[in-house]
Image (cartoon, rainbow, N blue to C red):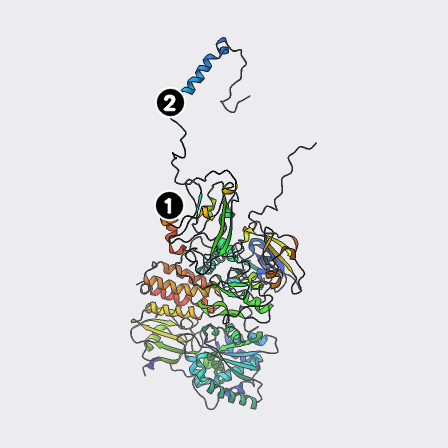
Amino acid sequence: MEQKQLKKIDIIFGWDDKCTPIQVVEKTIKKTAESIILDMIDSGLKGRGGAGFPTGLKWKFTRNEESDVKYVICNADEGEPGTFKDREILDRVPEKIFSGMTICAYVIGAREGYIYIRGEYNFMLKTLQQKVDLFNQQLHDKKVDFQIYLRSGSGAYVCGEESALFESMEGKRGEPRNKPPYPTVAGYNSKPTVINNVETLVYTSEICRMGPEQFKALGTKDSRGSKVFSVSGDTPIAGIYELELGMSLKDFVEDFGDGDTKAIQVGGASGHCVPRKKFNDTIIGFEGIPTGGSMMIFNSSRSMYNVLHDYLEFFTEESCGQCTPCRIGCQQLLKGIEAVKKGERPPTYLDDLKRLTATMKIAAKCGLGQSVANPFTSIVDNFREEIIY
Amino acid sequence: MQMLTDRSKVVSDKKMTFMERIYIPAIVKGMFITLKHFFGKKTTISYPEQKREFSKVYRGQHVLKRDDIGRERCTACGLCAVACPAEAITMIAAERKPGEENLYREEKYAAVYEINMLRCIFCGDCEDACPKEAIFLTDRIVASQYKRKPFIYGKDMLVEPLDPSKRIDISARQTENVNKFKLEKRFAHNK
Amino acid sequence: MPLLKVTIDTIEVEVEAGTTIMNAARQIGGSVVPPAMCYYSKLEGSGGKCRTCLVKVSRSSSKDIRPLPKLVAACRTAVQDGMVVQNTTSPEVMESRQAITEFLLLNHPLDCPVCDQAGECHLQDLSYEHGLEDTNTVEERRTFEPVDIGDYIKLHMNRCILCYRCVMVADQLTDKRVHGVLGRGDHSEIGTHISKAIDNDFSGNMIDVCPVGALTDKTFRFKSRVWFTKPLDAHRECPTCSGKTAIWMKGSEILRVTGRKDKYGELEEYICNDCRFHHKDASDWIIEGPRAIERHSVISQNHYEKLKTPGTTEPEF
């Protein structure tokens, strides 16, 4: 394998026979909820879905809410193009997710937990359900008052947005809600809810297993720990890798590139496109470019116009259609770059389109519409000539 | 008192002289002026054998235009009527039925469109208000009538003939800007 | 409960806790009120979709003097004590509002001359105030054929701006909603499931809540332009609703019956279909008097009843 320079980390997929996930739960719930929250805050764990909200704080806020019913939800609606890490986690170590959820439920005082799986992963529902049943039984035997249920989505990208996910779970049209209130106050069924990414929950379980210090030792000041990356595109070694946060893109390309890397799309379709000349001073992490784990590598045989066109087609299709800037903006951007490519509009029209993305960024209701500006401006700024000609 | 203009004259009531009192020189002087006009240029013409040349933007009888393939442009939007200072225009709209697409351009059309020519002051505001380039004022003169009723012009008098050779030419009224506006795709109606 | 002090465009107002910025601004009234295309105070959960009411919060509260990082939807954001809001005084807000108007008009056809809503259309008002004079786009608009939904309502999907108000009215006023938003992203449209007809006693209110001409009254279709009709307040004994309506007359004929709308274009009371569609005879109604129409509205054009007649010029003996 060529990944010799890579610092091999095996937190997520590693398996400790002496301390299985259910034993982690057993061990952890002997501590007080406050000390678990302190551990989480101390570890510096931030949400791994992409937005990067500190997990400990999220749990603390929800714990402080007064409510008889609270929920823990695992967001496994992994719809971002180029991301496939959650699928692997769900497939290989689902028990760690369950254990993370149980710990969270213990901290905030929830009795029900849900795993929302994207519709495309339905093939694994059957085996997953068996594992959930087994885990529920173990919890029951150990007199832990918590049960986990599976919920399946129907293949909408926007349902990965937390409030749209609640709507979908409540049986409504998957559309983001107005914020505030935030999920910690009114989430699923308008009750306080913790919603975490699959990977985040696994890390919480692992932090409880090995203590916050070992996790804290990895990464940088702003981005503690490691992260699972889904590497795809023009690379000889596509796949899933757990890497330390805070590495520069240059190191990343040296390990994964095929020697002719032109650009990397960090963070999937809604992330940023980094051209070769900026590899040196771009850091993967919350201080540089935060990512949900997707790294798409493009070499010089790829047309960035096609890349952008595909992304915009994706967003046009996947916008929920609720708020004006996103619904019409995406469609207009797509038509706009097509017109520029065909020569129907002058190249300066791209600047008008960039003005539209600026509006979308400030005016759109949820993260989907706000983040369309990221790939658009980064590709148009760096690869303008490829779009014009 | 200080006068505001210098055009005022002080009226005097001095007694007329003998020559003034017999009036004959004054009569001769007046007759001479009258006679002079027999030989000058005539200011009248004998209409309708002779017609004056009109200004290009003369505002006379209205026309309701058809488009290039003979469909009525008017969609009975009522903007002409609301713009009309004399309230001379009335209309009743109707919905285009399937099969009438070659008669009317839009899904709504004016079933009745009347202009009361006695009220009309030919200001041209209706033409300015029209969003569909349907109504124009032309250089035609509204004919005189003996009764009031015929002055209410209906669609039979206003809509131009279908025959392309008998269309009313309003090209003089369409400025370069208007033509450019019509050519631009982004201003196309109902797309 | 102590009242909260909010400053909107340098005007201070005291409101109850839980009031949204929009409603606080409406208490002040005038030009500080942000426009609303989707928010409807009588519909629970409406708002937050069209993004025309975005305002800048330059001070979150008296405790937290930092500004909010993004523009917020005035219709959905609750005020805090000591909050400072900028609406028309913020160039950023005005710019984004102009851009949203441009977005809304991208798919909206320029068929105001045909549309029955012209004259009382909120999108017309919005584009008059915030729209560009010119358009930058040449792309084709998306087009649909007008469809009949039920016996009384015509749906012009071309004109729809997807404010969801009609869906919420159906949800909150009736038991069984048979129409909704279909599709996603740029395909989203209002429709009934497999062209089901909407027949409900209160379905006509969808016409009144529609901010544009997407849902129009079939009994009034192309009958007259709004500004040629005279609105009068009238009422009748109605077993299903309050019977308090506005009737729109031309001569002695009632062309249309609608609910009474306040100055923000919102219905004061919902009326039933019986009142709305089946009572077009002046003898059915007890007329209260002419409706007050804003002087700047096109509906008040050529209506002289409010003018004072000059006093007589004859000398008195």
Chain under callout 1? B
Which disc is residue B171 wearing?
1
Q: Position of residue B167 (x, y in %)?
A: 38, 47
Q: Residue at x 47, y 41 (%)?
A: B122
Residue lying at the far top of the rendered structure: B18
Chain under callout 2? B
Q: Nearer the viewer, mark 1 or mark 2?
A: 2
- Kind of residue sitting beneath label 1: Ser
Q: Nearer the viewer, residue C182 or A241?
A: C182
- Between the residue at mark 1 and the residue at mark 2, the CA separation in whole angstroms equals 41 Å
- Note whether residue B156 is visible: yes
Q: Nearer the viewer, residue A275 or B87?
A: B87
Q: Residues within 10 Å of mark 2 (few under 14, many from 20)?
A: few
Q: Position of residue C258 (x, y in %)?
A: 59, 59
| Quarter of the view holding residue A246 | bottom left
Residue lying at the far front of the rendered structure: B146
- Under circle 2, the secondary element is helix
- Under circle 1, the secondary element is helix
- Circle 2 is placed at which residue position? B39
| Quarter of the view holding residue A270 | bottom left
Q: Are marks 1 and 2 in contact (CB under 8 Å)?
A: no
Q: Position of residue A222 (x, y in %)?
A: 45, 72
